[in-house]
Image (spheres, rainbow, N blue to C red):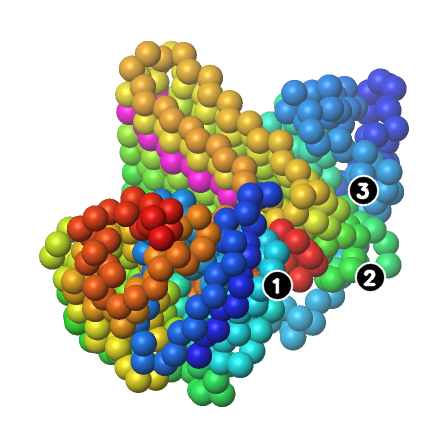
Amino acid sequence: MPEIQAPSARLVTADVQPYVDHFDGALSRRLREPQWLGQQRLAARDALVAMGLPTTRDEEWRFTPVAPLTIRSFQPATRGAIGRDALHAMRLSGPVAAELVFVNGWFAPALSRLGSLPAGVAADSLSAVVARVPAVIDTELGRLARADRHAFAAINTALFDDGAVVTVGPDVAVDGVIHVLFVADAPTDAMAVHPRLLVRAGANSRVQLVESYYGTAGQVYFTNAITEVTLEAGARVDHYKVQRESRQAFHVGLTHVQCDRDSRFSSHAFSLGGAWVRNEVTATMADQGAECTLNGLYLGDGHSMVDNHTTIDHAKPHCSSHEVYKGILGGPARAVFNGKIVVRPDAQKTDAKQTNKALLLSDLALINSKPQLEIFANDVKCTHGAAVGQLDEQAIFYLRARGIGERDAKGMLVHAFAGEVLDGVRLEPLRQRIEQVIAADLTAMLAGQGTV
Amino acid sequence: MLEIHDLQVRVEEKQILRGITLAVNTGEIHAIMGPNGSGKSTLANVLAGRDGYEVTGGSVTYKGQDLLGLDPEVRAREGVFLAFQYPVEIPGVNNAYFLRAALNAIRKHRGLPDLDAVAFMKMIKEKAKELEMDPAMLNRSVNEGFSGGEKKRNEIFQMAVLEPTLAILDETDSGLDIDALKIVAAGVNAMRSPDRAIIVVTHYQRLLDYIVPDFVHVLSDGRIIKSGTRDLALELEEKGYGWIDAEPAHA
């Protein structure tokens, strides 16, 4: 293996300079890392310098300028301390097989619960796995989320401090939920955190996974997360993402999934916080008979911006995908939805269905919504539907005419709108938690609007 | 209970009601008949408080208060019920859940405690049975995928549950076959009470064979041009609305 080289002399542009500085500043800390990881980080750093941050000239970022992010100067995350009481509201109740807590990107073993995992299942911090079993992790990390193709993947790869690794062995069914909880708490500096989650579900295994992001109210910080999930043949993974960052936070979350033969993946992504949010979910149907569900619900209020980009890549025949994304926007909030479905020439008998709907609760809210079907096979079934609308005045009157107050009537209709996505949450305590968060936000949203 | 005095209403610059005066007392059933475009549904909607109707003159007093000054939900809580001509489909809102929220909002207004879920379900199942409604409809979304007849039956069912003091049935008979009409009429008749008034808005006499009104009013071009008893409805059935429109000219 070649020696780690000095960073290349390419000119570093201002947009990526802070991250290059963070990289340089962390070099001494990384000395104990294995060489393969150092190589990956350096390659990512160089890729970042070469790519720069995306601009609105990039089709994938057309409606999402990164300027709000670049005008702030984020510091590298420092270890934080989160109280057990504060953590309590973020923990998952119900049957939990393991709960891994990360504070500012660092694993917090004292706050984590790893006790009740069945044989064949491993959940640990990335740093521990790197130190213990580098042989597996070196080819897995960054295999789906390629640092040479995405600036934020490059930033994460160059800079992540820690993360979680979940491995489920073949034929193992995990009864409880595995919860990976990322908490941000930076009372002073605006920090950048780069969490990382790597999941491998072995053949015919079954696991439910919750990935949560919580922040401390009022704090400005930047979460730049990567999740990579691989499902081997016949595996079944239900993945829930709950993003409840502070209202001032920035959040970029890249989720990459690979579904092998006859596997089933479901994603339920709830984007409920943050001022500037970009979620990407990319699922590749890599072998026949795979099935995936990508559902999402996002809320936007005030001057927030939330962007959801999804890609389902049907690479092989006889796979199916179902996608439902719904957005609720109040105030002058902005949103972007881009749902790409690629059906490759080989992927005959693909069955893909996409629905995206947005509900605008104010005249100022705005969404740019785009279904993007790229179909290169001829014997396929692909449908998509998009709708943007306001609350149905007829329905509001109907409810009011039965005695239900105007705000309750609107709340009921918004809840009904979100219902299709909420109903997909099979974990009852989690669904209740999400419903509470949404109900609280809606009350604020509807109260903030004189007219709808 | 209800006193409508010289009510004038405009919809999008068009004068629809040109001075309606009508008094409805408790225990009475009034039928409002008239040809299409005479203003029947406008009257029903104005009483319920629907947006888009501009009251340009007159007054409506209900139980001694100015009805037109109340929000629709407050009217409902005070006992006004409109059975919609076109019940709205509300996907994702469960019928029973919605009705319980409505009932409890009304109860709260009257200083009564919430009805708990068990007592509520028992009560609505009984009411549904009386109206020969499929109990499965209770757990479906409000009116979603209901046939025309099912929607109308659901309106009467809601009325039975909410027990209003003033019920306004707007063309409840339209879209009903004869069997459904009989069931709906039986539901309405079961609601007849000395404490309650009912206004039946209809184009056809047919419904009045089953819901026998105390008074019949004929509306034409925004005015009540004739009032009478049930016989007036029968006469209308026989001679058509043309007879009544023509009559003032002969008088």
Q: Nearer the viewer, residue A165 or A68?
A: A68
Residue A222 left/right relative to B83: right
Q: Residue at x 46, y 17 (%)?
A: A374
Q: Chain of mark 1?
A: A
View extreme (left): residue: B179
Q: From the image, state whether disc 2 or disc 3 is nearer to you.
A: 2
**SS label for mark 2:** loop
Q: Residue at x 62, y 31 (%)?
A: A368
| Crowd tier of the residue under label 1, counting other residues whose Cα lies within 10 Å: few below 14, some 14–19, many 20 or above | some
Magenta segment's dominant SS is strand
| Callout 2 amino acid | Pro
| Residue A382 position (above or below residue A104) | above
| Crowd tier of the residue under label 2, counting other residues whose Cα lies within 10 Å: few below 14, some 14–19, many 20 or above | few
Nearest to N terminus: mark 2 or mark 3: 3
**SS label for mark 1:** helix
Residue at image mark 2: A187
Residue A347 left/right relative to A112: left
Q: Nearer the viewer, residue B192 or B219?
A: B219
| Mark 2 and mark 3: Cα distance apart in space | 22 Å
Residue at image mark 1: A443
| Callout 3 amino acid | Ala
Label ID, residue A26:
3
| Residue A257 position (above or below residue A54) | below
Q: From the image, state whether disc 2 or disc 1 is nearer to you.
A: 1
Q: Chain of mark 3?
A: A
Label ID, residue B229:
none
| Mark 3 and mark 1: Cα distance apart in space | 44 Å
| Callout 1 amino acid | Thr
On the image, the x and y values in percent for residue B147 come to 24, 48
- Quarter of the image where one finds residue A69: top right
